[in-house]
């Protein structure tokens, strides 16, 4: 099953490949890529959510540019790869697999792999422009244990984040895919890559689970606040009486 699909570009915006996250019946996931010179063969053949039989591809072991930390192999599509769409009547494929990394377990990725994270955002921006002319948007991403990490989104992804936050002014829960972890000013933060996607669909089970977890302590916080307010109100009334 094709679970995610996106275009990969270089720092200067040059199109390099179209990449995918694919899963099998056993729940395993792999990174799949089609180079820019042959990617057009697969534009209409491989679509998100579709299930396909692939023949004639390569499997490579890589220590550079892999988006799945615990899966060092990458499927390479080529001109001789055959694609055939099939049906999955059993519904045994996982539509939205993520290998989420807890903030407490973050380590520098050293440009060798990327990580997926989930968290919520309350404030974003403002947008800034680097000396190179690149646009960035920064914000704090907080997990269900109230642990925060600084996030930097570059270029159009930052533009998209600003628009999404305007549409979600309160607590905005998201999954960020393919993030690079690196130190900046002595703190470990996350920076977007050309493979990063902002996932906010309510259909994603991992995001539903996260929203449920933060809703629990959010409600506890309101109960605690109301309890304190009740005590203070009672004391004030006693004083007046």
Image (tube, rainbow, N blue to C red):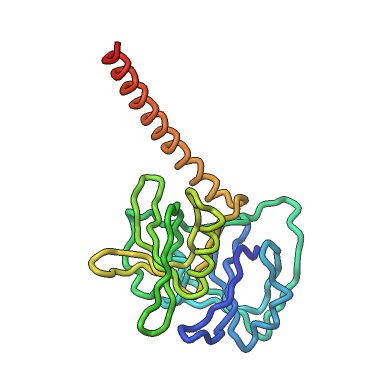
- Left or right: residue 201 compared with residue 101: right
Please tell me which residue is depicted at 41% across the width and 33% down the height of the picture: 222
- Extreme-front residue of the structure: 240
The quarter holding residue 167 reads bottom right
Please tell me which residue is depicted at 62% across the width and 79% down the height of the picture: 77
The quarter holding residue 64 reads bottom left
* Image vertical order of residue 99 relative to residue 30, above or below: above
Which of the image's four quarters has the C terminus?
top left
- Extreme-bottom residue of the structure: 37
Which of the image's four quarters has the N terminus?
bottom right
Please tell me which residue is depicted at 55% across the width and 46% down the height of the picture: 208
- Residue 29 x/y as whole percent: 55, 62
- Left or right: residue 48 compared with residue 127: right
- Count of number-bearing discs: 0
- Residue 126 x/y as whole percent: 41, 66
Between 37 and 136, which is closer to the camera in this rendering? 136
Between 116 and 144, which is closer to the camera in this rendering? 144
């Amino acid at each position: 099953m094709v679970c995610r699909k996106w275009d990969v570009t270089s720092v200067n915006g040059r199109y390099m490949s179209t990449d995918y996250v694919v899963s099998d019946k056993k729940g395993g996931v792999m990174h799949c890529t089609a180079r820019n010179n042959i990617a057009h063969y697969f534009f209409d053949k491989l679509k998100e959510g579709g299930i396909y039989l692939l023949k004639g591809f390569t499997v490579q072991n890589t220590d550079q540019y892999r988006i799945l930390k615990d899966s060092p192999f990458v499927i390479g599509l080529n001109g001789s790869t055959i694609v055939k769409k099939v049906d999955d009547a059993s519904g045994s494929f996982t539509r939205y697999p993520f290998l989420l990394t807890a903030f407490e377990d973050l380590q520098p990725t050293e440009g060798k792999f990327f990580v997926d994270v989930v968290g919520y955002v309350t404030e974003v921006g403002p947008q800034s422009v680097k000396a190179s002319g690149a646009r960035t948007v920064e914000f704090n991403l907080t997990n269900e244990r109230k642990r925060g990490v600084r996030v930097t989104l570059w270029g159009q992804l930052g533009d998209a984040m600003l628009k999404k936050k305007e549409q979600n002014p309160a607590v905005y829960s998201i999954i960020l895919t393919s993030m690079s972890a690196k130190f900046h000013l002595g703190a470990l933060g996350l920076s977007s890559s050309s493979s990063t996607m902002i996932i906010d669909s309510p259909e994603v089970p991992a995001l539903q689970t996260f929203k449920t977890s933060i809703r629990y302590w959010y409600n506890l916080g309101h109960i605690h606040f109301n309890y304190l307010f009740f005590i203070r109100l009672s004391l004030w009334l006693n004083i007046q009486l």
